[in-house]
Image: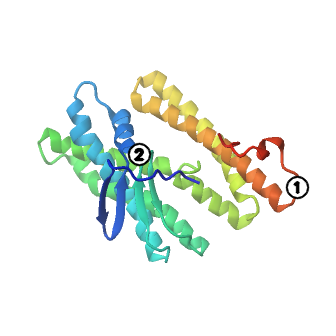
């Protein structure tokens, strides 16, 4: 369901642990917008953006290595609007759940490793301390945010998988409905945070939550359409338009 952008001449490419990784230019732009520091732009360029890249790659490696371990073929990682690890479908529900949790789980492990340095600060160097703080906060916050039950985040995929265990038919439709509720709640929380703290990160959270609400509204309509087709029921008028998702 997620859009994978085509390669461009400006993509950054390398391999890690045998897994190809591609970074689209849009990733750098969004990372800069999310963490731009007007008081010290060098912190954004030299600390924030490299730490975001490292943290997202580690997160996606958790997904990719798990998929490869369970026979999901040769995975690849693409960083665009957000990280995406693509692989073949996994056969068992247990394997899919482990695969989903591997990403945020890896991030939380990194946060736990960095935590002693974060709290003790044994190295008296501004740039080193800035890197430690940034790595800790990104891996902790991003991993916890990813566990929120909103598609296409890991928490939303986990919710869909658990729903499918009880009621396989229409599980995606129900997961999208849950995602809409949770995304609206997240948008309200971020809006309050943006008003109180006047931080760009909170405003970005409002934008992200709004986009996730829109995404899941469209996916819920798609799920309803697919369920009706399986039941051989008439299509609605909007479903006859090939560009309905726009």
Please tell me which of labels 2 and 1 falls first in the chain.
Answer: 2
Residue at which label 1 appears? 233
Q: Report the mark closest to the observer, 2 or 1.
A: 1
**Colour basis:** rainbow
Q: Quadrant of the C terminus?
A: top right
Picture layout, residue 241 above or below residue 193: below
Residue 119 appearing in the image: no
How many numbered marks have been drawn onto this rendered protein structure? 2
Q: Residue at position x 38%, y 44% from top?
A: 27
- SS state under label 2: helix
Task: Name the residue at 52% across, 27% down.
Answer: 191
**Residue 213: percent from the left, percent from the top?**
62, 39
Q: Is disc 2 in contact with disc 1, using a CB cutoff of under 8 Å?
A: no
> On the rendered image, what quadrant is the N terminus found in?
bottom right
User: In the drawing, does residue 100 fall left or right of residue 175?
Assistant: left
Q: Is residue 2 visible to us here? A: yes
Q: For the residues marked 2 and 1, what is the alpha-carbon distance in whole angstroms?
A: 44 Å
Residue 127 percent coordinates (x, y): 16, 41
Q: Nearer the viewer, residue 196 or 165?
A: 165
What number is the disc on residue 4?
A: none
Q: Residue furthest right?
A: 233
At 29% across and 58% down in the image, what residue appears? 113
Rendered location of residue 126, percent (x, y): 15, 38
Q: Which mark is residue 141?
A: 2
Residue 48 coordinates in the image, percent (x, y): 28, 41
């Amino acid at each position: 369901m997620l859009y994978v952008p085509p390669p461009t001449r400006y993509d950054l490419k390398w391999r890690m642990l045998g897994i190809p990784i591609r970074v689209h230019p849009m990733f750098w732009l969004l990372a800069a917008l999310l963490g731009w520091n007007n008081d010290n732009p060098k912190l954004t360029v030299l600390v924030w953006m490299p730490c975001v890249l490292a943290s997202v790659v580690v997160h996606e490696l958790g997904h990719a290595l798990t998929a490869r371990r369970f026979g999901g073929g040769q995975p690849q990682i693409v960083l665009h609007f957000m990280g995406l690890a693509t692989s073949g479908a996994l056969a068992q529900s247990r394997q899919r759940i482990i695969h989903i949790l591997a990403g945020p789980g890896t991030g939380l492990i990194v946060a736990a490793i960095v935590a002693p340095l974060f709290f003790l600060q044994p190295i008296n160097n501004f740039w080193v301390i800035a890197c430690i703080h940034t790595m800790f906060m990104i891996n902790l916050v991003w991993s916890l945010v990813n566990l929120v039950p909103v598609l296409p985040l890991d928490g939303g995929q986990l919710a869909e998988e658990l729903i499918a265990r009880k009621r396989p038919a229409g599980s995606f439709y129900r997961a999208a409905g849950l995602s809409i509720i949770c995304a609206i709640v997240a948008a309200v929380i971020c809006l309050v945070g943006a008003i109180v703290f006047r931080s760009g990160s909170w405003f970005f959270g409002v934008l992200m939550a709004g986009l996730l609400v829109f995404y899941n509204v469209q996916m819920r309509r798609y799920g309803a359409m697919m369920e009706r087709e399986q039941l051989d029921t008439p299509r609605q008028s909007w479903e006859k338009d090939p560009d309905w998702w726009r």
